Amino acid sequence: MSGEGATRPLAIICGGGAFPLEVARAAAATGASPFLVGLVGASDPGVEAFPHVWLHLGQVGKLFAELAARGIAEVALVGALTRPEFADLRFDWGALKRAPELAKAFRGGDNRLLSGIAAVFEGEGFKVVGAHEIAPQLVASLGALGARVAPASAEMDIQTGAATIAALSPFDAGQGVVVAEGRILAIEAAEGTDAMLARVAEMRASRRLKMTGPAGVFVKAPKRGQDLRLDMPAIGPRTIAAAIEAQLLGIAVVAGSVLIAERESTLRAADAAGLFITGFVP
């Protein structure tokens, strides 16, 4: 976001965690005026440090009214959010008027859902922007990101992981995979990154995976054709903690296509644990 866009008000629809707040601070530093939309039961209470409103999922009409009242033209969807069931949403009248569009978006994987939600915003005249456009300094660069360098022996696992995510892209599956010595140990699906890495940790603890010492690489990459404005892959301190529990060698992310939340603390934790974090090109 630059030029004229940097001076206009910006709405950030906040998922869970501290990452939406980090993006909001980055937006403010560029001269933008972030307005945060907190989702009840999901967003961090820190949204209240900014101009904000709290909404329940399904209050679409109230959301658009709040944005219109503030002259907001740009919207970003930032942070993790547990996918709700369509029947559980608390629709207001504005949502009911758009129910056919919303129901269609829910028929499929997360990418289809997010694309459908973006289409609803765009249909109302909003421009949807990505976290990487607001805070490009959070995007992973090429090569070693921390103090540890990925060993040459990890290259095959990194490329195997990237190829696996690309091959699964038509099925709108997850954005992560764990590979050790060419063997796929886990693939991220609806459970998300943390739960997938916890499965690896449990398999190692129970000796279902009989490996000695640190082994394996967690590869994080966008799905082929994924709209990075809506769901750019990200890692953060929780990812590092989960990778440590899973006794991995390191983490590989696609340079230019993965965000690093809380970058300083993330890299510091990885360095302390002896984990490498590297940006690569598939």
Image (cartoon, helix red, strand yellow):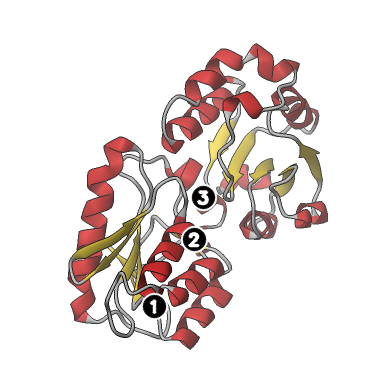
The earlier-in-sequence mark between 2 and 1 is 2
Q: Amino acid at mark 1?
A: Gln
CB under 8 Å between discs 3 and 1: no
- Residue behind mark 3: 133
Q: Amino acid at mark 2?
A: Asp
The earlier-in-sequence mark between 3 and 2 is 3
The earlier-in-sequence mark between 3 and 1 is 3
Which residue does the image show at 57% across and 50% down from the upper left? 80
For numbered disc 1, what is the local secondary structure? loop
Which residue does the image show at 61% across and 24% down from the upper left? 87
- Residue behind mark 1: 247
Mark 2, Cα crowd under 10 Å, few <14 / some 14-19 / many 20+, is some
Q: Residue 57: percent from the left, percent from the top?
A: 69, 33
**Residue 40 falls left or right of residue 129:** right
Residue placed most toward the observer, 60 or 68: 60
- Residue behind mark 2: 194
Residue placed most toward the observer, 28 or 77: 77
On screen, 237 above or below 192?
A: below
Q: Residue 193: percent from the left, percent from the top?
A: 45, 57
Which residue does the image show at 68% across and 41% down from the upper left? 11
For numbered disc 2, what is the local secondary structure? helix
